Image (tube, coloured by chain):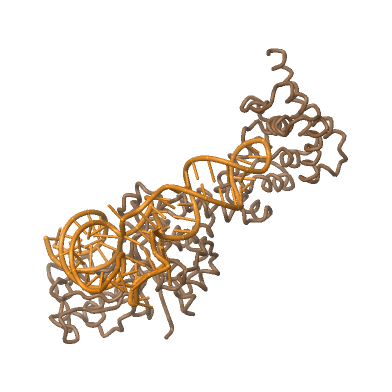
Chain colours: A brown, B orange
RNA sequence: GGCGCCGUCGUCUAGCCUGGUCCAGGACGUUGGGUUUUCAUCCCAAAAAUCACGGGUUCAAAUCCCGUCGGCGCCA
């Protein structure tokens, strides 16, 4: 069988995180089965559909790396087709007109049964009593098809073999199967994915919750591979007792099996996304990360060489891309030395003064190539501690704070390496003056 | 209201089909400790689930059966 799956988002809002996951699972199902992954835009609701939303959906899917295989189908361009199918249904007695709309007539039997039976790939055997399903609208009075008709017709024409969609459609499945029988269509396999819900276990709301892939995640500095990894584990697990938690898209394309999709809804918990994002950020090379940061935001004026050094030393401390600018201001502009104490809490004013002075002396004397190596710079500071018979905190802390003015920052050797000899010594001497002032006051 | 799906640590989940190795495993988060000048990383440890509840089957149930409750979804 040539496996063909699709997603069919409505461009009535930006790409939703739930749609993204449905897209992922469809995409993975296609890839693991050597099939095709299609995209259809359900834009029959002309009043709420916009091109801007459609563009957001397409760019969002591409950003995630979920490239679709064939041409995009727009339902708005196929209205005559639906009308024709609806007419044929009326002609065959499967449907009837009422108050301008066309209704599908639920048959008394289906293949000599009073039930609709199907196997859901996620949930197993499903049975719905025909008497519980009532006639439903397939064509509205304004000439637009309802979701039920359009989806069935389009899935048939694009030869969809597996319908993988959200659980909110589970009870629609028997209606679609009935339509497929009446039209003589093949019935595809169905798989209904569990919903992604809020902490309070209700549906995530566009208004209140972070659901937009572009606005709430991409623009906040999340990486596509972190999103993918996070989303994949919402409802799916690798099975076989595997405890693997990091998956690239390529790995997912090998590991995914729809049998390992669970049936219960997943609560959206962003702290786990942060964990994945920090992980993938750390995995970037400084060069790659710098390139990405330039695309993401406007960076302060500086040479690439300088920026690359900044990226190198702060990379491991970022959770999102947007942390970068926030965490690195002091590299680009000399900060006032008032934000953090120059004296470590286990040190004294006198020892810090001695430590900082000794560090300046040692750094001034250090050979030029010392400044090209974080290790070498660190060695200079460590030797200073030894020679002056001080503690680490008497030297490392005041050097670090004099350079950054922060109580939390990369190590002093890293700061020295980024700032270079001239700027570093300038700041360190500024630190000495601040300590002298404190001595006089104290 | 009818029908349907779901119910294991705060969260994501493994285990459930094929009952015993599960006084329930992993991860995130949290807390404590180690490394360290700080933060982050890294390492170690701990707390955290009466397996929704009740009954039944069985020598034995998270796992099988019945019922109840709860959450959600679709339809009305």
Residue A306, how many percent across, how many down?
A: 73, 44
Q: Residue at x 68, y 52 (%)?
A: A286
* Location of residue A191 in the rendering, given as x and y in whole percent from the top left corner: 34, 72
Q: Judge whether B3 appears above or below A95 on screen.
A: above
Q: Quadrant of residue B24?
A: bottom left
Q: Nearer the viewer, residue A88 or A118?
A: A118
Left or right position of A333 against A73: right
Give x and y (percent) for residue A302.
Answer: 71, 42
| Residue appearing at x 69%, y 54% in the figure | A287
Residue that sits furthest to the top in the current view: A441
On screen, residue A399 versus residue A192, left or right, reads right
Q: Nearer the viewer, residue A329 or A63?
A: A329
Q: Is residue A7 visible?
A: yes
* Location of residue A180 in the rendering, given as x and y in whole percent from the top left corner: 26, 80
Q: Quadrant of residue A400?
A: top right
Q: Residue at x 86, y 38 (%)?
A: A366
Q: Is residue A190 visible?
A: no
Relative to A259, is A426 above or below?
above
**A392 or A398, nearer to the observer:** A392
Number of marks in picture = 0
**In which quadrant of the rendered view does residue B64 lie?**
bottom left
**Horizontal relation, residue B23 to residue A176: left or right:** right
| Position above or below: A419 against A121 | above
Please tell me which residue is depicted at 69% across the width and 45% down the height of the picture: A307
* Viewer-side residue, A391 vs A267: A391
Check the picture and name the quadrant holding the N terminus of chain A.
Answer: bottom left
Which quarter of the image is occupied by the C terminus of chain A?
top right
């Amino acid at each position: 069988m040539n496996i063909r799956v699709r997603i069919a988002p409505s461009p009535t809002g930006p790409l939703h995180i739930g749609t993204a996951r449905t897209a992922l699972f469809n995409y993975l199902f296609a890839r693991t089965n050597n099939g095709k992954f299609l995209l259809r835009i359900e834009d029959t609701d002309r009043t709420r559909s916009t091109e801007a939303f459609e563009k957001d959906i397409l760019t969002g899917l591409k950003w995630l790396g979920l490239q679709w295989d064939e041409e995009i189908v727009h339902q708005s361009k196929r209205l005559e087709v639906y009308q024709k199918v609806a007419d044929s249904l009326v002609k065959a007695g499967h449907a009837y007109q009422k108050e301008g709309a066309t209704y599908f007539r639920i048959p008394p039997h289906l293949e000599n049964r009073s039930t609709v039976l199907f196997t859901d790939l996620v949930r197993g055997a499903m049975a719905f009593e025909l008497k519980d399903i009532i006639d439903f609208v397939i064509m509205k009075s304004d000439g637009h098809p309802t979701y039920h008709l359009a989806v069935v017709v389009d899935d048939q024409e694009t030869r969809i073999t597996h319908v993988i969609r959200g659980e909110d459609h589970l009870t629609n499945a028997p209606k679609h199967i009935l339509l497929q029988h009446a039209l003589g269509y093949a019935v595809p396999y169905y798989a209904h994915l569990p919903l992604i819900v809020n902490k309070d276990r209700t549906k995530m709301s566009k208004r209140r919750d972070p659901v937009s892939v572009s606005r709430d995640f991409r623009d906040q500095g999340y990486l596509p591979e972190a999103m993918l990894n996070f989303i994949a584990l919402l409802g799916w697990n690798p099975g076989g007792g595997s405890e693997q938690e990091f998956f690239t898209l390529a790995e997912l394309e090998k590991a995914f099996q729809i049998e390992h999709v669970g049936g219960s809804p997943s609560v959206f918990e962003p702290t786990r996304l942060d964990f994945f994002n920090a992980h993938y950020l750390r995995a970037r090379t400084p060069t790659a990360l710098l390139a990405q940061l330039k695309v993401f935001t406007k960076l302060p004026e500086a040479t690439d060489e300088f920026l690359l050094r900044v990226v190198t030393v702060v990379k491991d401390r970022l959770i999102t891309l947007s942390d970068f600018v926030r965490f690195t201001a002091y590299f680009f502009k000399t900060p006032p030395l008032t934000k953090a104490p120059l004296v470590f809490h286990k040190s004294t004013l006198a020892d810090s003064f001695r430590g900082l002075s000794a560090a300046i002396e040692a750094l001034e004397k250090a050979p030029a190539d010392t400044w090209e190596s974080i290790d070498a710079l660190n060695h200079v500071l460590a030797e200073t501690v030894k020679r002056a018979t001080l503690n680490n905190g008497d030297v490392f802390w005041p050097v670090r704070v004099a350079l950054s003015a922060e109580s939390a920052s990369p190590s002093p050797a890293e700061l020295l390496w980024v700032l270079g000899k001239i700027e570093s010594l300038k700041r360190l001497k500024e630190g000495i003056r601040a300590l002298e002032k404190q001595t006089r006051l104290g």
